[in-house]
Image (cartoon, rainbow, N blue to C red):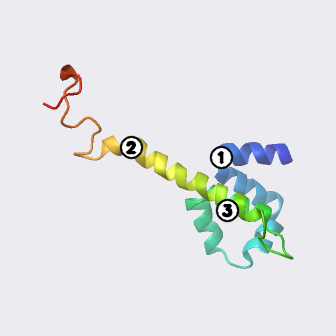
Amino acid sequence: MGCLLVLMGGLFPRFGVLLVYIARPVYFTAAFGDMWLWPILGIIFAPFTTLMYVLIWTPSTGISGFDWFWLALALAIDISHYAGSAYGNRDRLPGNSSNSGYNSNNMGRPM
C-alpha cells in the first residue's frame, strides 16, 4: 500500500488523495474534522498540499516542527505547477507572444 500511495501521490496527486480517502477515511476526519469544504477546495486547487497535510497530521499535536517544511514544500510544488502552466501558455493570449515585434529573418532584430 505504501509504494502504491507514493507512486500515485507523486504522479497523480488527486488520485493519491482519493486513494488515501478510500483506504483510510479516518485520516481525513482527524485532519479536517467534520468540514467538507476545505478538503474539496484543497483537492481542486492544491492537491499536493492536501495530500501532505492529511499524511503528516497527528491528532495529538497537529502539525509541528519539521512537518511545516514538508507542508511548505508541497505548497511550493502546487504553486510551481500553476506558475509553469501560466508560463507555458503565455503565447496563447492575444498580443503576448514571446516573439512579438521580432522577425526571425532578421536574427532577432526589431522589425
Q: Earlier in the sequence, mark 1 or mark 3?
A: 1
Between tags 1 and 2, which lies in front?
Answer: 2
Where on the picture, by quarter, is residue 96?
top left
In the image, 54 versus 105, the foreground residue is: 105
Q: In x, y percent, where is residue 20? A: 77, 57
In the rendered structure, which amino acid carries the disc numbered 1? Phe
95 relative position to 62: left or right: left
8 relative position to 110: left or right: right
In the image, 31 versus 60, the foreground residue is: 60
Per the image, the residue denoted by label 2 is 89
Q: Is residue 1 visible?
A: no
Q: Is residue 26 visible?
A: yes
- Disc on res. 50: 3
- Disc on res. 12: 1
Other-residue count near label 2 (Cα within 10 Å), few / some / many at <14 / 14–19 / ≥20: few
Q: Earlier in the sequence, mark 3 or mark 2?
A: 3
**Residue at the farthest top position:** 105
In the rendered structure, which amino acid carries the disc numbered 3? Thr
Other-residue count near label 3 (Cα within 10 Å), few / some / many at <14 / 14–19 / ≥20: many
Q: Secondary structure at mark 3?
A: helix
For marks 1 and 2, give the CA distance.
21 Å
102 relative position to 43: left or right: left
User: Where the C terminus falls, by quadrant?
Assistant: top left
Q: Secondary structure at mark 1?
A: loop
For marks 3 and 2, give the CA distance.
26 Å
Q: Secondary structure at mark 2?
A: loop
Q: Are marks 1 and 2 in contact (CB under 8 Å)?
A: no
Q: Earlier in the sequence, mark 1 or mark 2?
A: 1
For marks 1 and 3, give the CA distance.
13 Å
